Amino acid sequence: MSRHARALVCLVLLCAGITSASESAAADSAVSLGVGYVLEPAGWFPDLPVVSPYGGHLFVVGPVVAFGPPLGGLHPGVDPEEYTYAMYVPYGYGGVWDDFQNGRAGWWGLFWNGWLRVYRDPTSDSAIGDAGSFQNGELILEFRVDDLDLWAEWCARAGTETANLTLTGGALHLQVSPGGQPVDADATGEYVSTQLCDWQQACAVSWPEQIACLRSDVFLGPVQARPATWGRIKAQYR
């Protein structure tokens, strides 16, 4: 088994909880983002139970595992092309929470004004250790990430993710929105840290900058009708 394959097996075992828990949601989503690699310097939020310093960010790359309507004609794993994604969202602010009565505590963070990009690549060359290889295909969907909220419990090393998105571009934008209008969307997901409560590495991976794995499902809102203009009305009767 190759080093790449061993690392993927390791990540699958590490993130088994988040993949199984989200399978039902993936069936209803427009884009199902597979387990991605959260890449940050060691000890950076959201790995250790501290708040990210101002100027930090969340950066994730990974595979797309499924598409749903109106993109159901794309079939990752079946089509010869490879589908991948990258997400970059700067950190806004965050803090800690506690529930002393039940002996629980954790942290949360809000990230905003970033982007999520989905690519289609005929070469199928994405590789652990090379973030650029997940971003070198044709840009087919581009979302603005208006805000993304991470919420986690200490020692569980797992958390939830919710985000508000807007589809703004990409080669398949018009397939989703024939008039080219932006489309509101939202995402939900889960992540698992690569470290356990004792801060010992839980799984050896071949990507030193990886601090967690994250998967998400993107749900598209209704496409808004294009506003009527005098120019469009005149064009209909020419």
Image: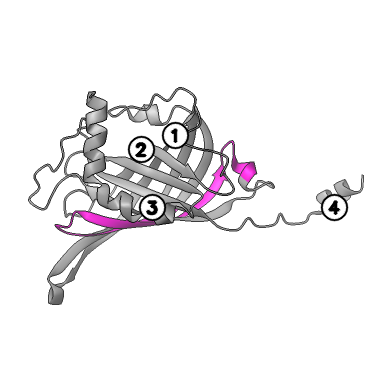
Q: Which residue is mark 4?
A: 233
Q: Secondary structure at mark 2?
A: strand
Q: Main secondary structure of the magenta part?
A: strand
Disc 2 to disc 1, C-alpha distance? 17 Å
Please provide percent x and percent y for residue 199: 10, 47
Q: Are marks 3 and 2 in contact (CB under 8 Å)?
A: no
Q: Earlier in the sequence, mark 2 or mark 1?
A: 2
Q: Are marks 4 and 2 in contact (CB under 8 Å)?
A: no
Q: Dot 3 lies on which element? A: helix
- What's the residue type where badge 1 is placed? Gly
How many numbered markers are drawn? 4
Instruction: Let me know if residue 151 is in the magenta part.
Output: yes
Q: Quadrant of the N terminus?
A: top left
In the rendered image, the quadrant that contains the C terminus is top right
Please determine whether, in this image, residue 77 is positioned above or below residue 57. above
- Which residue is disc 2 drawn over? 61
Q: Nearer the viewer, residue 153 or 10?
A: 10
The residues colored magenta run 146-175
Q: Secondary structure at mark 1?
A: loop
Label 1 Cα neighbours within 10 Å, binned few <14 / some 14-19 / many ≥20: few
